[in-house]
Image (cartoon, rainbow, N blue to C red):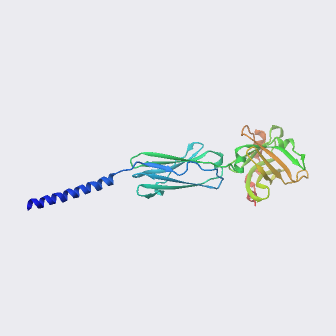
Amino acid sequence: MKKTVLFICSIVLTGIISSQLIISCKKEKSVPTEMTINITSTPKLNIGEVVNAKVTIVTDGVKSFKYYKIVDNKKDAGTEVAAQLVQTGKTWVYDFSYTVQQYDDLYTLGFEFELTDDKGEVKNVGLVVNINISVESMLVKYDWKVTESTWLGMDVLQPWDAAIIYRFNKDGSYQEDLSPEYAADNHHFCFWVFKETPNNGDTISILRLVRRLKQGDTAIDEYYDYKITAANESEMTMFWDVAVFGLLGIQNTFKSQAKGAFVPYGTPAEEAKVNANASLSCSHIDPALLIIN
């Protein structure tokens, strides 16, 4: 009888140990680490539009998960977002979102997602963001010159205007190279303001140039609005609705050129004179002029 009891106990004990081993093996079974992204490049986007992508990870555990913003093939320091992963079992999901910013279109833009699993294995996937260049960015990307100026079909382009090279900076400042022949210190070229006007007939946007005009021992604010009716990276058509020699509605054609040699005001001496004239300082500009209604 005792032998029978011992035999039964032995069978039960063996069964318990076997079941525990099976459970233990199931718990210890690992999965190979994989990471995928639902899109690797976007369609052409405009400034202000949103990039959405989904990164899916299958792994036993996540040690680190970050993304890098890559501008002209240069990676930033990276952003750790492991805490934002949504886990279901051994699957983690990250919903990525990015709003295209002004001037992103001046560069190549992409994102790299980097996973380090709990064993130290690293996986990467990438996303290329394709962007249409905006008119505002076109102005910044190149230098610009007026090559045609007409009124009622007549050529009214003056030599001093044809000599000017315009340079628009991302910080909202602008400069004019007047050429050595027409170098002068009559103005301090200060700011440019841009506004898209899609509901304004054939005017797609307005470009305002704000500057200080010397008036004897003092100076006053002065600005001009250009109505842009057509634009691409090579050429822009603008209307200048201001009285010049009694003329209104002058049509100007601006041509782009690669940024190169540039001397503000025409010569270093004239630039120094402008900067030394306190009354011409751009700090005097009325802030209201920096808003196009």
Q: Percent from the top left, x then y, of residue 76? A: 54, 46
Q: Percent from the top left, x then y, of residue 279? A: 77, 51
* Res 11 → quadrant: bottom left
Q: Nearer the viewer, residue 213 or 131?
A: 131
Q: Percent from the top left, x then y, of residue 181? A: 83, 38
In the image, is 214 to the left or to the right of 246? left
In the image, is 131 to the left or to the right of 238? left
Q: Residue at x 82, y 52 (%)?
A: 239
Q: Residue at x 77, y 39 (%)?
A: 269
Q: Residue at x 85, y 46 (%)?
A: 149
Q: Which quarter of the rendered picture does the C terminus lie within?
A: bottom right
Q: Which quarter of the rendered picture does the N terminus lie within?
A: bottom left
Question: Is residue 90 visible in the rendered structure shown here?
Answer: yes
Q: Percent from the top left, x then y, of residue 41? A: 58, 48
Tally of numbered tags: 0
Q: Nearer the viewer, residue 291 or 1?
A: 1
Q: Nearer the viewer, residue 32 or 234?
A: 32
In the image, farthest residue toward the left: 1
In the image, is 63 to the left or to the right of 4? right
* Res 16 → quadrant: bottom left
